Image (cartoon, helix red, strand yellow):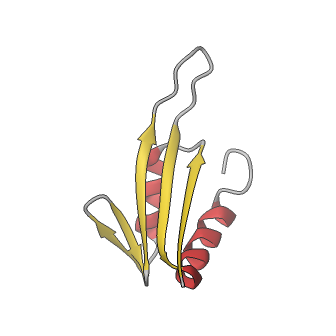
Amino acid sequence: MKKEVRENWALSIDRVREFFLAQEDVLPLDRGYAYKGCVIQVRSQKSSGPLAMERTQLYFSGEAEDLEEIRRRFFLRFLSAGG
C-alpha cells in the first residue's frame, strides 16, 4: 500500500543529509534519497525573527512498510532535544 508523510523538523538540512548518507541501505538521489520502495525528499525551511531556528521539511512517499521503517529510524535518531 502506498503512503505519504510530510514532516517539518527543527534540524539543519546538513544534519538530515548526514543521517541519510550514513545509512548503508539508503541511496542518494538528485533531490533526496531512496530506501527500498520509499523516496525521501528534503528541503530547507527558513525561519525569520530573533529566535529563528533552522528547519528541514521531509517528504516521505512510497510503500507504507518501507516508509515506516526508515521514518522510525530517523525519528529514533533525532527523538531527544538537540539530537
Q: Is residue 3 left or right of residue 36?
A: right
* Residue 4 screen position, x and y as percent: 53, 67
Q: Is residue 67 above or below residue 15?
A: below
Residue 82: x percent and y percent? Answer: 68, 45
Q: Residue at x 50, y 55 (%)?
A: 58
Camera-nearest residue between 43 and 63: 63
Q: Specify the quadrant of the image occupied by residue 69.
A: bottom right
**Residue found at x 59% / y 65%:** 74
Q: Position of residue 44 (x, y in %)?
A: 43, 42
Q: Is residue 10 above or below residue 48?
A: below
- Tally the numbered discs: 0
Is 64 or 81 nearer to us in this picture?
Answer: 64
Farthest front residue?
1
Q: Can you name the residue that lies furthest to the left here? A: 30
Q: Quadrant of the N terminus?
A: bottom right
Query: In the image, 32: left or right of 47?
Result: left
Rendering coords of residue 2 (x, y %): 51, 79
Q: Say which residue appears at 52% left-offset and 20% top-offset.
A: 48
- Residue 60 lies, with reference to residue 24, above or below; the image says above
For this orientation, the residue located farthest to the right is 80
Q: Relative to residue 73, is residue 31 drawn left or right?
A: left
The residue at 46%/31% (across/down) is 46
